[in-house]
Image (cartoon, rainbow, N blue to C red):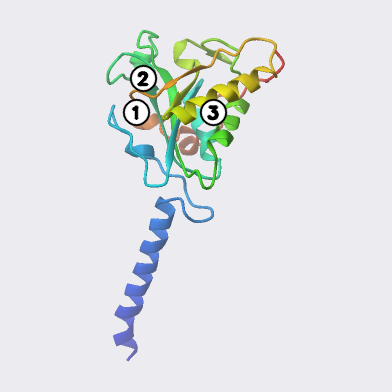
Amino acid sequence: MVNMLRPLLFSLVVLASCHSASAADNGSGPGTKVGTSPGHAGQGTALTPEPGHQLAGFAEGCFWGSEDTFRQVPGVIATAVGYSGGHTKNPSYEDVCTHTTGHAETVLVEFDPARVTYAALLRTFWDSHDPTTLNRQGPDFGDQYRSAIFTFSAEEETQARASMSDEQKHYKSPITTQIQPMSVFWKAEDYHQQYDEKTGRHSCPLPNRKSS
């Protein structure tokens, strides 16, 4: 009788494991791992979030530390880093580092608006970099390190502009953040993805804020 039950018990364990894995992939359970394919991002491919989710795009200097920051926000389903806002097709990191592509190092975020608002993501954005330094964050210089918000709807653009206007009240220097619709997102090389998680380090230290 025990031998007859073993296959059934094994099937139930496998089924339970599959359900658990599915929940983790969808970021639906507590403590679940954040995904790595927001909007099914690829090399300039169309970006399509899962049903009920939304997309957001942020550039705020080196994308290693920036991505790690957004991956800590509850309600963020998936993130990836790449290049946006420029004119060069299918750029490599080496191309972007020449400062001739027009691209910014960008974090693409897929989020569940029932768990985290776009306004909350904007708050994370403002709090994690200095938006008053043109084409620079800390020791990193060049247009790839500029501050930018890439929007996916008219509503996101409206919220972003209102948020920037409110944020300006906290600075003496003018905010240099660009706000523009997301056109094409070129996913960066694999070694850049989730860099801080892979290396166990906290890259790109954040500058002192709201003192300039």
In what quadrant of the picture does the N terminus appear?
bottom left
The tag earlier along the polypeptide, 1 or 2, is 2
**Residue at x-position 31% and y-position 86%:** 3
Q: For the residues marked 1 and 2, what is the alpha-carbon distance in whole angstroms?
A: 8 Å
Q: Mark 2 points at which residue?
A: 93
- The crowding category of the residue bearing disc 3, from other C-alpha atoms within 10 Å (few below 14, some 14 to 19, many at least 20), is some
Left or right: where 74 falls relative to 1: right
As rendered, which of 206 and 124 lies closer to the eye? 124
Q: For the residues marked 1 and 3, what is the alpha-carbon distance in whole angstroms?
A: 31 Å
Q: Extreme bottom residue here? A: 1
- SS class, disc 3: helix
How far from the left and from the top, in percent, is residue 207?
64, 20
**Residue at x-position 52% and y-position 45%:** 75
Left or right: where 181 falls relative to 175: left
How far from the left and from the top, in percent, is residue 141?
51, 10
Q: For the residues marked 3 and 2, what is the alpha-carbon distance in whole angstroms?
A: 31 Å
Q: Name the residue under label 1.
A: 189
How far from the left and from the top, in percent, is residue 210?
69, 19
The tag earlier along the polypeptide, 1 or 3, is 3
* Amino acid carrying mark 2 in the image: Tyr
Please name which of the two marks, 1 or 3, marks the residue nearer to the observer: 3
* Amino acid carrying mark 1 in the image: Glu
Q: Do tag 1 and tag 2 residues touch (Cβ < 8 Å)? A: yes
Q: Mark 3 points at which residue?
A: 159
Please name which of the two marks, 3 or 2, marks the residue nearer to the observer: 3
- The crowding category of the residue bearing disc 1, from other C-alpha atoms within 10 Å (few below 14, some 14 to 19, many at least 20), is few
- SS class, disc 2: helix
